[in-house]
Image (tube, grey):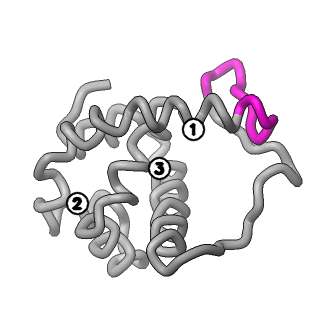
Amino acid sequence: MPFSLALLVLPLCLQKDSREVIAGSSRSYLLKTVEKNPQLLVGFADRASDLLPFALEAFGVLMERGCFVVSQEGRLKTVPDRVRKSVTGTDESVSCQRVARIVGKEFARIADRVTVYATFGIRP
């Protein structure tokens, strides 16, 4: 996943309303989900900006722990056996993890940063 797209995962997963919409339409394409649910876009740019310091701090900790590497193209790649694949925790954290997985797969499927940023109405 490109680094710039990874910064959009937290604002989509941590807000309960967004999380519920995405989880409820996991069989649909993310772009269609956003089109059918414009409420996902309300305040998204502010949420993304507000969560940026936390995302960068998390990336720093994960990098320090050797959980992922950054490729020459700027993509984040997990290191095998360093990231737990099981989803555990409270109901809310499990929900966040599941939606993060959905969002990650959708970003990989879309494979175009410009499309994702334009869909969410923000600039990189």
Residue at 41%, 49% in the rendered image: 10
- Position of 119 compared to 23: left or right? left
Mark 2 and mark 3 lie on one chain; the one further toward the N terminus is 2
73, above or below 37, in the image: above
Residue 18: within the magenta?
Answer: no
Label 1 crowd bin: few (<14), some (14–19), many (20+), radius 10 Å: few
Please, which residue is most extreme toward the right here? 81
Which residues fall within the magenta stretch? 63-74
Label 3 crowd bin: few (<14), some (14–19), many (20+), radius 10 Å: many
Residue, disc 1: 58
Residue at 19%, 38% in the rendered image: 46
Residue 38: x percent and y percent? 12, 60
Which SS class for mark 1? Answer: helix
What's the residue type where badge 2 is placed? Val
Residue 106: x percent and y percent? 47, 57
Residue 8: x percent and y percent? 39, 43
Corner quadrant of residue 87: bottom right
Residue 41: x percent and y percent? 16, 52
Residues at marks 2 and 3, CA–CA distance in whole angstroms = 13 Å
Mark 1 and mark 3 lie on one chain; the one further toward the N terminus is 1
Which mark is in front, 1 or 2?
1
What's the residue type where badge 3 is placed? Phe
Q: Which mark is residue 34?
A: 2
Residues at marks 1 and 2, CA–CA distance in whole angstroms = 26 Å
Q: Kindly check if marks 2 and 3 are in contact, taking CB atoms under 8 A apart as contact.
A: no
Please, which residue is most extreme toward the front here? 90
Residue at 50%, 69% in the rendered image: 93
Residues at marks 1 and 3, CA–CA distance in whole angstroms = 20 Å
Residue, disc 3: 107
